Amino acid sequence: MADDTHDIILIGGGVIGLAVGWSLAQAGRGVAVVERGQLGQGASQAAAGMLAAGIETEPSEEGLLPLTRAAQALWPDFAAKLEAASGHSLHYRTEGSMVIALTRDDREWLQRLARFQGKCGVELEFLTPSQARQREPALTPNLTAALYSRQDHQVENRALAPALAVALRRAGGIIYDHSAAELICDHGRCVGVRRRHSDGSSQDMLAARVILAAGAWSRDLVGLPAAARPPVRPIKGQMLAVQMDAAAPLLRQVVWTQNIYLVPRDDGRLLIGATIEEKGFDPHVTAGGLFGLLEAAWRALPAIEDLPVVESWVGHRPGSPDDAPILGEIQAGLGADGLILATGHHRNGILLTPITAQLIADFVRQGEMADLGQKFSPRRFY
Ligand code: FAD
Ligand code: GLY
Protein backbone atom coordinates (compact mmCIF):
# COMPACT_ATOMS: atom_id res chain seq x y z
CA MET A 1 0.00 0.00 0.00
CA ALA A 2 1.21 3.53 -0.73
CA ASP A 3 1.91 5.76 2.29
CA ASP A 4 -1.35 7.65 1.95
CA THR A 5 -3.53 4.56 1.66
CA HIS A 6 -4.93 2.91 4.75
CA ASP A 7 -7.03 -0.08 5.60
CA ILE A 8 -9.26 1.68 8.17
CA ILE A 9 -9.44 5.35 9.17
CA LEU A 10 -11.26 6.45 12.30
CA ILE A 11 -12.39 10.06 12.63
CA GLY A 12 -12.25 11.17 16.27
CA GLY A 13 -9.78 10.33 19.01
CA GLY A 14 -12.18 10.06 21.94
CA VAL A 15 -12.66 6.79 23.82
CA ILE A 16 -14.96 5.41 21.10
CA GLY A 17 -12.62 6.02 18.14
CA LEU A 18 -9.57 4.82 20.05
CA ALA A 19 -11.24 1.70 21.43
CA VAL A 20 -12.65 0.66 18.05
CA GLY A 21 -9.19 1.31 16.58
CA TRP A 22 -7.46 -0.76 19.26
CA SER A 23 -9.85 -3.65 18.73
CA LEU A 24 -9.26 -3.66 14.97
CA ALA A 25 -5.49 -3.26 15.33
CA GLN A 26 -5.43 -6.28 17.67
CA ALA A 27 -7.19 -8.22 14.93
CA GLY A 28 -4.31 -7.36 12.59
CA ARG A 29 -6.00 -4.54 10.66
CA GLY A 30 -4.15 -1.40 9.58
CA VAL A 31 -5.68 1.45 11.59
CA ALA A 32 -5.22 5.22 11.54
CA VAL A 33 -7.05 7.56 13.94
CA VAL A 34 -7.42 11.24 12.99
CA GLU A 35 -8.10 13.65 15.86
CA ARG A 36 -8.42 17.38 15.28
CA GLY A 37 -7.20 18.36 18.77
CA GLN A 38 -5.67 16.42 21.61
CA LEU A 39 -6.76 12.82 22.14
CA GLY A 40 -9.57 12.28 24.63
CA GLN A 41 -10.28 15.94 25.33
CA GLY A 42 -13.96 15.88 24.24
CA ALA A 43 -16.76 14.28 26.27
CA SER A 44 -14.37 11.47 27.18
CA GLN A 45 -12.48 13.88 29.42
CA ALA A 46 -15.58 15.52 30.88
CA ALA A 47 -17.40 12.35 31.99
CA ALA A 48 -17.83 10.92 35.47
CA GLY A 49 -16.75 7.40 34.48
CA MET A 50 -19.78 5.65 35.99
CA LEU A 51 -20.52 2.24 34.52
CA ALA A 52 -24.09 2.46 35.67
CA ALA A 53 -26.15 0.10 33.52
CA GLY A 54 -28.51 -0.49 36.45
CA ILE A 55 -29.07 2.71 38.35
CA GLU A 56 -28.93 5.03 35.35
CA THR A 57 -31.63 3.17 33.43
CA GLU A 58 -34.69 5.39 33.22
CA PRO A 59 -38.21 4.71 31.97
CA SER A 60 -38.16 4.66 28.13
CA GLU A 61 -34.57 3.36 28.12
CA GLU A 62 -35.46 -0.34 28.46
CA GLY A 63 -34.33 -0.92 24.88
CA LEU A 64 -30.81 0.16 25.74
CA LEU A 65 -30.48 -2.19 28.70
CA PRO A 66 -29.25 -5.32 26.84
CA LEU A 67 -26.44 -3.21 25.39
CA THR A 68 -25.49 -1.47 28.64
CA ARG A 69 -25.54 -4.75 30.55
CA ALA A 70 -23.41 -6.45 27.93
CA ALA A 71 -20.97 -3.54 28.25
CA GLN A 72 -20.95 -3.84 32.02
CA ALA A 73 -20.13 -7.54 31.74
CA LEU A 74 -17.20 -6.80 29.42
CA TRP A 75 -15.68 -4.08 31.61
CA PRO A 76 -13.59 -6.09 34.12
CA ASP A 77 -11.82 -8.02 31.38
CA PHE A 78 -11.52 -4.98 29.11
CA ALA A 79 -9.96 -2.96 31.94
CA ALA A 80 -7.51 -5.73 32.82
CA LYS A 81 -6.45 -6.20 29.18
CA LEU A 82 -6.08 -2.49 28.57
CA GLU A 83 -4.04 -2.01 31.73
CA ALA A 84 -1.76 -4.87 30.66
CA ALA A 85 -1.45 -3.59 27.09
CA SER A 86 -0.74 0.01 28.09
CA GLY A 87 0.88 -0.15 31.51
CA HIS A 88 -1.63 2.51 32.69
CA SER A 89 -3.96 2.09 35.67
CA LEU A 90 -7.62 2.83 34.90
CA HIS A 91 -8.58 3.01 38.60
CA TYR A 92 -11.44 0.59 37.99
CA ARG A 93 -13.48 0.51 41.22
CA THR A 94 -16.08 -2.02 42.27
CA GLU A 95 -17.66 -0.64 45.46
CA GLY A 96 -21.02 -0.32 43.71
CA SER A 97 -23.42 2.61 43.65
CA MET A 98 -26.16 3.89 45.93
CA VAL A 99 -29.25 5.99 45.27
CA ILE A 100 -30.55 7.97 48.22
CA ALA A 101 -33.80 9.75 49.01
CA LEU A 102 -33.83 12.84 51.24
CA THR A 103 -37.54 13.66 51.50
CA ARG A 104 -40.85 11.80 51.41
CA ASP A 105 -41.30 12.86 47.78
CA ASP A 106 -37.86 11.54 47.01
CA ARG A 107 -38.76 8.24 48.63
CA GLU A 108 -41.78 7.90 46.33
CA TRP A 109 -39.54 8.59 43.37
CA LEU A 110 -36.98 6.05 44.57
CA GLN A 111 -39.64 3.38 45.04
CA ARG A 112 -41.00 4.03 41.54
CA LEU A 113 -37.47 3.83 40.15
CA ALA A 114 -36.81 0.57 41.99
CA ARG A 115 -40.07 -0.95 40.72
CA PHE A 116 -39.20 0.02 37.15
CA GLN A 117 -35.59 -1.14 37.35
CA GLY A 118 -36.60 -4.33 39.17
CA LYS A 119 -39.02 -5.15 36.31
CA CYS A 120 -36.14 -4.67 33.88
CA GLY A 121 -34.13 -7.23 35.85
CA VAL A 122 -31.70 -4.82 37.50
CA GLU A 123 -30.42 -6.32 40.75
CA LEU A 124 -31.00 -3.84 43.56
CA GLU A 125 -30.99 -4.02 47.34
CA PHE A 126 -33.15 -1.77 49.50
CA LEU A 127 -31.25 -0.22 52.41
CA THR A 128 -32.72 1.40 55.49
CA PRO A 129 -31.40 4.91 56.20
CA SER A 130 -29.20 3.51 58.97
CA GLN A 131 -27.81 0.78 56.70
CA ALA A 132 -27.01 3.43 54.11
CA ARG A 133 -25.23 5.53 56.72
CA GLN A 134 -23.28 2.53 57.95
CA ARG A 135 -21.92 2.23 54.43
CA GLU A 136 -21.37 5.97 54.07
CA PRO A 137 -21.33 7.69 57.49
CA ALA A 138 -20.90 11.21 56.08
CA LEU A 139 -24.30 11.13 54.34
CA THR A 140 -26.93 13.42 55.81
CA PRO A 141 -29.00 12.00 58.72
CA ASN A 142 -32.10 13.18 56.78
CA LEU A 143 -32.17 10.09 54.58
CA THR A 144 -35.61 8.59 53.98
CA ALA A 145 -34.60 5.55 51.88
CA ALA A 146 -31.74 4.12 49.84
CA LEU A 147 -31.01 1.58 47.13
CA TYR A 148 -27.74 -0.20 46.46
CA SER A 149 -26.57 -1.57 43.12
CA ARG A 150 -23.58 -3.87 43.48
CA GLN A 151 -22.87 -4.11 39.76
CA ASP A 152 -22.62 -0.41 38.94
CA HIS A 153 -18.86 0.23 39.04
CA GLN A 154 -16.73 3.20 38.00
CA VAL A 155 -13.51 3.92 36.12
CA GLU A 156 -11.24 6.99 35.85
CA ASN A 157 -12.37 8.05 32.38
CA ARG A 158 -9.49 10.52 32.06
CA ALA A 159 -7.07 7.58 32.14
CA LEU A 160 -8.91 5.80 29.36
CA ALA A 161 -7.92 7.71 26.20
CA PRO A 162 -4.19 7.87 27.11
CA ALA A 163 -4.20 4.13 27.86
CA LEU A 164 -6.04 3.33 24.62
CA ALA A 165 -3.59 5.48 22.65
CA VAL A 166 -0.60 3.56 24.01
CA ALA A 167 -2.31 0.19 23.43
CA LEU A 168 -3.35 1.17 19.91
CA ARG A 169 0.16 2.28 18.95
CA ARG A 170 1.66 -0.88 20.46
CA ALA A 171 -0.76 -2.92 18.34
CA GLY A 172 0.53 -1.14 15.21
CA GLY A 173 -2.04 1.67 14.88
CA ILE A 174 -1.16 5.20 13.78
CA ILE A 175 -2.55 8.34 15.41
CA TYR A 176 -2.65 11.74 13.69
CA ASP A 177 -3.65 14.29 16.30
CA HIS A 178 -3.99 18.04 15.84
CA SER A 179 -5.37 17.54 12.35
CA ALA A 180 -9.05 17.91 11.47
CA ALA A 181 -10.60 15.27 9.27
CA GLU A 182 -12.77 16.04 6.26
CA LEU A 183 -14.56 13.25 4.44
CA ILE A 184 -13.68 12.46 0.84
CA CYS A 185 -16.52 10.97 -1.20
CA ASP A 186 -16.34 9.95 -4.83
CA HIS A 187 -19.37 9.02 -6.94
CA GLY A 188 -21.49 8.71 -3.80
CA ARG A 189 -19.01 6.48 -2.00
CA CYS A 190 -16.88 7.36 0.99
CA VAL A 191 -13.28 6.70 -0.03
CA GLY A 192 -11.04 8.44 2.47
CA VAL A 193 -10.19 11.38 4.66
CA ARG A 194 -8.49 14.72 4.12
CA ARG A 195 -6.34 15.77 7.05
CA ARG A 196 -6.45 19.55 7.43
CA HIS A 197 -3.54 21.03 9.39
CA SER A 198 -3.70 24.24 11.44
CA ASP A 199 -1.67 26.13 8.77
CA GLY A 200 -4.42 25.33 6.22
CA SER A 201 -2.40 22.72 4.32
CA SER A 202 -3.93 19.29 3.84
CA GLN A 203 -3.14 15.70 3.00
CA ASP A 204 -5.47 13.15 1.42
CA MET A 205 -5.59 9.60 2.76
CA LEU A 206 -7.53 6.85 1.02
CA ALA A 207 -9.07 4.00 3.00
CA ALA A 208 -10.98 0.78 2.47
CA ARG A 209 -13.21 1.75 5.42
CA VAL A 210 -13.91 5.04 7.22
CA ILE A 211 -15.51 5.07 10.68
CA LEU A 212 -17.02 8.27 12.04
CA ALA A 213 -16.55 8.54 15.82
CA ALA A 214 -16.50 12.30 16.27
CA GLY A 215 -18.86 12.41 19.26
CA ALA A 216 -21.12 15.48 19.49
CA TRP A 217 -19.42 16.90 16.36
CA SER A 218 -20.32 13.94 14.13
CA ARG A 219 -23.03 15.86 12.29
CA ASP A 220 -20.69 18.69 11.32
CA LEU A 221 -18.02 16.72 9.47
CA VAL A 222 -16.84 18.68 6.43
CA GLY A 223 -17.41 16.68 3.24
CA LEU A 224 -20.27 14.59 4.67
CA PRO A 225 -23.24 15.00 2.31
CA ALA A 226 -26.27 16.64 3.95
CA ALA A 227 -28.46 13.55 3.48
CA ALA A 228 -25.94 11.38 5.34
CA ARG A 229 -25.51 13.59 8.42
CA PRO A 230 -26.30 11.64 11.60
CA PRO A 231 -28.88 13.27 13.91
CA VAL A 232 -26.40 13.84 16.73
CA ARG A 233 -26.58 16.97 18.86
CA PRO A 234 -24.53 18.26 21.81
CA ILE A 235 -26.07 17.87 25.27
CA LYS A 236 -24.17 20.16 27.59
CA GLY A 237 -23.08 18.88 31.01
CA GLN A 238 -21.46 20.94 33.75
CA MET A 239 -19.54 19.35 36.60
CA LEU A 240 -17.19 20.30 39.39
CA ALA A 241 -14.76 18.58 41.73
CA VAL A 242 -13.97 19.19 45.39
CA GLN A 243 -10.91 17.77 47.09
CA MET A 244 -11.35 15.28 49.93
CA ASP A 245 -8.56 13.83 52.06
CA ALA A 246 -7.51 10.87 49.89
CA ALA A 247 -6.47 8.90 52.99
CA ALA A 248 -9.85 9.44 54.70
CA PRO A 249 -12.37 10.22 51.96
CA LEU A 250 -15.85 11.45 52.88
CA LEU A 251 -17.36 9.00 50.43
CA ARG A 252 -16.20 5.62 49.09
CA GLN A 253 -18.89 4.67 46.61
CA VAL A 254 -20.85 6.46 43.93
CA VAL A 255 -23.98 8.10 45.34
CA TRP A 256 -26.94 9.37 43.32
CA THR A 257 -29.77 11.62 44.43
CA GLN A 258 -32.74 12.53 42.26
CA ASN A 259 -30.82 15.51 40.88
CA ILE A 260 -27.09 14.83 41.05
CA TYR A 261 -24.40 12.20 41.50
CA LEU A 262 -21.24 12.13 43.60
CA VAL A 263 -18.25 10.15 42.40
CA PRO A 264 -15.21 9.68 44.69
CA ARG A 265 -11.86 9.13 42.99
CA ASP A 266 -8.70 7.40 44.20
CA ASP A 267 -6.81 10.72 44.33
CA GLY A 268 -9.37 12.21 46.75
CA ARG A 269 -11.32 14.28 44.22
CA LEU A 270 -15.07 14.09 44.60
CA LEU A 271 -16.87 14.75 41.31
CA ILE A 272 -20.28 16.40 41.49
CA GLY A 273 -22.36 16.19 38.35
CA ALA A 274 -24.00 16.93 36.13
CA THR A 275 -26.34 19.33 34.39
CA ILE A 276 -28.19 18.25 31.26
CA GLU A 277 -28.70 21.25 28.98
CA GLU A 278 -29.83 21.86 25.41
CA LYS A 279 -27.49 24.80 24.76
CA GLY A 280 -25.56 23.69 21.70
CA PHE A 281 -21.80 23.89 22.12
CA ASP A 282 -21.98 26.58 24.82
CA PRO A 283 -18.63 26.18 26.66
CA HIS A 284 -19.45 28.15 29.83
CA VAL A 285 -19.56 26.97 33.40
CA THR A 286 -22.42 29.05 34.83
CA ALA A 287 -23.26 30.32 38.30
CA GLY A 288 -26.69 28.69 38.10
CA GLY A 289 -25.22 25.38 37.00
CA LEU A 290 -22.69 25.26 39.83
CA PHE A 291 -25.22 26.51 42.37
CA GLY A 292 -27.69 23.73 41.53
CA LEU A 293 -25.02 21.03 41.72
CA LEU A 294 -23.47 22.31 44.94
CA GLU A 295 -26.75 22.87 46.72
CA ALA A 296 -27.97 19.35 45.93
CA ALA A 297 -24.59 17.84 46.85
CA TRP A 298 -24.49 19.73 50.14
CA ARG A 299 -27.95 18.45 51.09
CA ALA A 300 -26.75 14.87 50.59
CA LEU A 301 -23.25 15.27 52.05
CA PRO A 302 -23.15 18.35 54.30
CA ALA A 303 -19.44 17.94 55.08
CA ILE A 304 -18.49 19.12 51.58
CA GLU A 305 -19.09 22.62 53.03
CA ASP A 306 -15.41 23.12 53.87
CA LEU A 307 -13.81 21.27 50.98
CA PRO A 308 -11.88 23.25 48.38
CA VAL A 309 -13.36 23.38 44.89
CA VAL A 310 -10.49 22.28 42.64
CA GLU A 311 -12.04 22.21 39.20
CA SER A 312 -15.17 22.87 37.17
CA TRP A 313 -15.80 22.02 33.53
CA VAL A 314 -18.22 21.56 30.68
CA GLY A 315 -18.58 18.62 28.30
CA HIS A 316 -20.86 17.86 25.37
CA ARG A 317 -22.54 14.48 25.28
CA PRO A 318 -23.27 13.16 21.79
CA GLY A 319 -27.06 12.91 22.02
CA SER A 320 -29.26 11.07 19.51
CA PRO A 321 -33.05 11.34 19.04
CA ASP A 322 -33.71 8.18 21.10
CA ASP A 323 -30.74 8.63 23.47
CA ALA A 324 -29.18 5.43 22.14
CA PRO A 325 -25.95 5.05 20.17
CA ILE A 326 -25.78 4.90 16.37
CA LEU A 327 -23.72 1.89 15.33
CA GLY A 328 -23.08 0.49 11.87
CA GLU A 329 -22.99 1.34 8.19
CA ILE A 330 -25.22 4.05 6.81
CA GLN A 331 -27.58 3.00 4.09
CA ALA A 332 -26.56 3.29 0.44
CA GLY A 333 -27.71 6.22 -1.67
CA LEU A 334 -27.07 9.07 0.77
CA GLY A 335 -23.82 10.12 -0.89
CA ALA A 336 -21.40 8.40 1.50
CA ASP A 337 -21.86 4.68 0.84
CA GLY A 338 -19.70 2.48 3.05
CA LEU A 339 -19.34 4.99 5.88
CA ILE A 340 -19.63 3.41 9.35
CA LEU A 341 -20.97 5.35 12.33
CA ALA A 342 -19.93 4.83 15.95
CA THR A 343 -21.49 7.82 17.65
CA GLY A 344 -24.47 9.12 19.67
CA HIS A 345 -23.44 7.49 22.96
CA HIS A 346 -25.03 10.28 24.99
CA ARG A 347 -24.79 9.63 28.76
CA ASN A 348 -23.26 6.15 28.46
CA GLY A 349 -20.23 6.38 26.19
CA ILE A 350 -17.70 5.35 28.82
CA LEU A 351 -19.82 2.37 29.84
CA LEU A 352 -20.44 1.45 26.19
CA THR A 353 -16.80 1.70 25.07
CA PRO A 354 -15.93 -2.03 25.15
CA ILE A 355 -19.18 -3.23 23.57
CA THR A 356 -18.98 -0.58 20.85
CA ALA A 357 -15.42 -1.62 20.07
CA GLN A 358 -16.46 -5.25 19.86
CA LEU A 359 -19.57 -4.70 17.73
CA ILE A 360 -17.95 -2.32 15.25
CA ALA A 361 -14.73 -4.33 14.93
CA ASP A 362 -16.73 -7.53 14.33
CA PHE A 363 -18.87 -5.72 11.77
CA VAL A 364 -15.79 -4.53 9.88
CA ARG A 365 -14.24 -8.01 9.92
CA GLN A 366 -17.36 -10.04 9.16
CA GLY A 367 -19.56 -7.61 7.21
CA GLU A 368 -22.52 -8.31 9.50
CA MET A 369 -23.74 -6.62 12.64
CA ALA A 370 -24.29 -8.94 15.62
CA ASP A 371 -27.90 -9.28 16.80
CA LEU A 372 -27.21 -7.15 19.88
CA GLY A 373 -26.17 -4.21 17.69
CA GLN A 374 -28.89 -4.40 15.05
CA LYS A 375 -31.44 -2.17 16.74
CA PHE A 376 -28.84 0.60 16.99
CA SER A 377 -28.34 0.74 13.23
CA PRO A 378 -28.13 4.22 11.63
CA ARG A 379 -30.91 3.08 9.31
CA ARG A 380 -33.52 3.85 11.99
CA PHE A 381 -32.94 7.56 11.35
CA TYR A 382 -32.62 7.88 7.57
P1 FAD B 1 -15.65 12.44 22.43
O1 FAD B 1 -14.93 12.03 23.64
O2 FAD B 1 -16.32 13.77 22.45
O3 FAD B 1 -14.62 12.34 21.23
C1 FAD B 1 -14.93 12.82 19.94
C2 FAD B 1 -13.62 13.33 19.37
O4 FAD B 1 -13.79 13.62 18.00
C3 FAD B 1 -13.15 14.62 20.05
O5 FAD B 1 -11.85 14.40 20.61
C4 FAD B 1 -13.13 15.64 18.92
O6 FAD B 1 -12.07 16.57 19.01
C5 FAD B 1 -12.97 14.74 17.71
N1 FAD B 1 -13.44 15.34 16.46
C6 FAD B 1 -14.58 15.99 16.23
N2 FAD B 1 -14.65 16.38 14.94
C7 FAD B 1 -13.50 15.97 14.35
C8 FAD B 1 -12.97 16.07 13.04
N3 FAD B 1 -13.62 16.67 12.03
N4 FAD B 1 -11.74 15.52 12.79
C9 FAD B 1 -11.04 14.90 13.76
N5 FAD B 1 -11.50 14.78 15.04
C10 FAD B 1 -12.72 15.30 15.32
N6 FAD B 1 -20.68 8.25 30.08
C11 FAD B 1 -20.64 7.17 30.90
O7 FAD B 1 -20.66 6.03 30.45
N7 FAD B 1 -20.57 7.34 32.25
C12 FAD B 1 -20.57 8.57 32.82
O8 FAD B 1 -20.49 8.69 34.05
C13 FAD B 1 -20.66 9.70 32.00
N8 FAD B 1 -20.70 10.93 32.54
C14 FAD B 1 -20.74 12.03 31.72
C15 FAD B 1 -20.76 13.30 32.30
C16 FAD B 1 -20.71 14.41 31.50
C17 FAD B 1 -20.72 15.79 32.13
C18 FAD B 1 -20.63 14.27 30.09
C19 FAD B 1 -20.52 15.47 29.20
C20 FAD B 1 -20.64 13.01 29.52
C21 FAD B 1 -20.71 11.87 30.32
N9 FAD B 1 -20.75 10.58 29.79
C22 FAD B 1 -20.69 9.50 30.60
C23 FAD B 1 -20.90 10.38 28.34
C24 FAD B 1 -19.55 10.07 27.68
O9 FAD B 1 -18.60 11.02 28.10
C25 FAD B 1 -19.66 10.14 26.15
O10 FAD B 1 -20.77 9.39 25.70
C26 FAD B 1 -18.40 9.56 25.50
O11 FAD B 1 -17.26 10.17 26.02
C27 FAD B 1 -18.43 9.77 23.99
O12 FAD B 1 -17.16 9.42 23.49
P2 FAD B 1 -16.77 9.80 22.01
O13 FAD B 1 -15.41 9.25 21.78
O14 FAD B 1 -17.86 9.40 21.08
O15 FAD B 1 -16.78 11.38 22.01
N1 GLY C 1 -23.82 9.47 32.76
C1 GLY C 1 -23.76 10.64 33.53
C2 GLY C 1 -24.00 11.87 32.75
O1 GLY C 1 -24.15 11.82 31.57
O2 GLY C 1 -24.07 12.92 33.35
Image: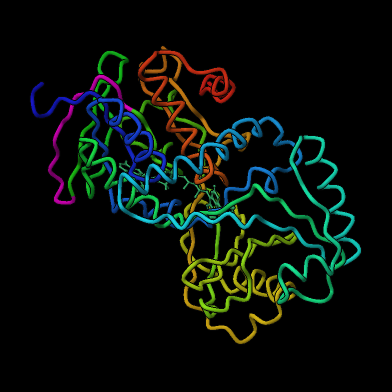
The relative height of residue 339 versus residue 141 in the rendered view (above or below) is above
Where residue 109 sits: x, y (%)? 85, 54
Residue at image x 22%, y 23%? Answer: 7
Where residue 278 sits: x, y (%)? 59, 51
Count of numbered circles on the image: 0
Residue at image x 64%, y 69%? Answer: 293
Where residue 31 sits: x, y (%)? 25, 31
In the image, which residues are magenta? 198-210
The relative height of residue 267 versus residue 304 in the rendered view (above or below) is above
Residue at image x 47%, y 33%? Answer: 356
Residue at image x 68%, y 30%? Answer: 63
Name the quarter where the N terminus is drawn: top left
Quarter holding residue 371: top right
Could you say which is closer to the camera, residue 47 or residue 23?
23
Would residue 145 be found to the left or right of residue 20 on screen?
A: right
Would residue 192 be found to the left or right of residue 105 on screen?
A: left
Color encoding of the figure: rainbow
Where residue 133 sits: x, y (%)? 77, 71
Q: Main secondary structure of the magenta part?
A: strand
The relative height of residue 324 versus residue 83 in the rendered view (above or below) is above
Identity of the residue furthest to the bottom in this view: 306
201 in the magenta segment: yes
Quarter holding residue 169: top left
8 in the magenta segment: no
